[in-house]
Image: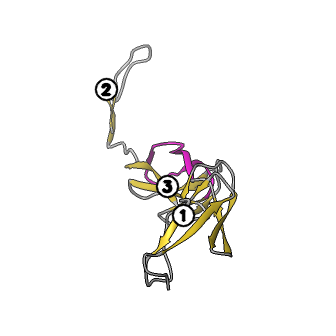
């Protein structure tokens, strides 16, 4: 345990993307201390070695720093479809694995997947990086009833050649 008044531990990081306090104090009577590691944005996977030194003893912990997941776009090819038809959903994303709910499953960035919803539905694309951080974006596909012709009648059922009549369709 730390001495009365606490013990000072010197910290260092070998990567500017992972900042640590210069020192931390282990409270009196305790044998551990927690501290935050603040990371900055990285564009590709990085590694940081965090070193803790107490008197003449040192230990190193290795942290993997990964880019945040990002979704550029997530859209249906057709936002409105008729019942019984289909459309495609395309998500463009980076720095993670993509998955779409409502039984679509895993998706690849830029690759369209076909969906055939029976009713209007909102799909959610979730992109998760290896650190477990996730971002989401939604896309709605509106399903409308298939049009039906309820009547289609001419104004006159019989006409003389060279004349015309009007046809009326009710949908």
* Figure quadrant of residue 47: bottom right
How far is mark 3 from mark 1, CA to CA?
Answer: 34 Å
x, y percent for residue 79 = 46, 43
**Label 1, on which residue?**
23
x, y percent for residue 132 = 55, 65
How far is mark 2 from mark 1, CA to CA?
Answer: 96 Å
Q: Which numbered mark, 3 or 1, is in the foreground of this view?
A: 1
Q: How crowded is mark 1: few (under 14 residues within 10 Å), some or many (20 or more)?
A: some
* Relative to 66, residue 162 above or below: above
Q: Which of marks 1 and 3 precedes in the sequence?
A: 1
Residue lying at the far top in this picture: please name it.
162
Q: Residue 105 carries which label?
A: none
- The C terminus lies in quadrant: top left
Q: Which numbered mark, 2 or 1, is in the foreground of this view?
A: 1
Q: Which of marks 2 and 3 precedes in the sequence?
A: 3
**Label 3, on which residue?**
135
> Which residue is pictured at 31% across the width and 26% down the height?
156
Q: Which of 112 and 100 is in front in this view?
A: 100
Q: Which mark is residue 156?
A: 2
x, y percent for residue 96 = 61, 58
Name the side, left or right, on which 88 lies relative to 26: right
- Find numbered disc 1 in the image and state the secondary structure of the residue it sits on: strand
How far is mark 3 from mark 2, CA to CA?
Answer: 63 Å
- Span highlighted in magenta in the image: 69-96
The answer to whether residue 74 is magenta is yes
Residue lying at the far front in this picture: please name it.
4
Q: Can residue 143 be seen in this view?
A: yes
């Amino acid at each position: 345990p730390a001495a009365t008044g606490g013990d000072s531990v010197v910290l260092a990081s070998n990567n500017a993307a992972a900042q640590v306090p210069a020192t931390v104090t282990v409270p009196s009577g305790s044998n551990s201390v927690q501290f935050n590691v603040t990371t900055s944005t990285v564009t590709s996977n990085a590694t940081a070695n965090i070193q803790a030194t107490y008197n003449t003893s040192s230990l190193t912990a290795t942290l993997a720093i990964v880019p945040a997941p990002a979704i550029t776009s997530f859209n249906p090819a057709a936002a409105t479809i008729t019942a019984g038809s289909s459309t495609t959903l395309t998500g463009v994303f980076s720095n993670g694995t993509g998955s779409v709910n409502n039984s679509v499953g895993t998706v690849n960035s830029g690759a369209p997947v076909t969906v055939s919803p029976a009713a209007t539905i909102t799909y959610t694309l979730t992109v998760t990086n290896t650190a477990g951080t996730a971002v989401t974006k939604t896309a709605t596909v509106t399903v409308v009833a298939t049009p039906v012709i309820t009547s289609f009648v001419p104004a006159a059922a019989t006409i003389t050649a060279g004349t015309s009549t009007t046809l009326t369709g009710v949908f």
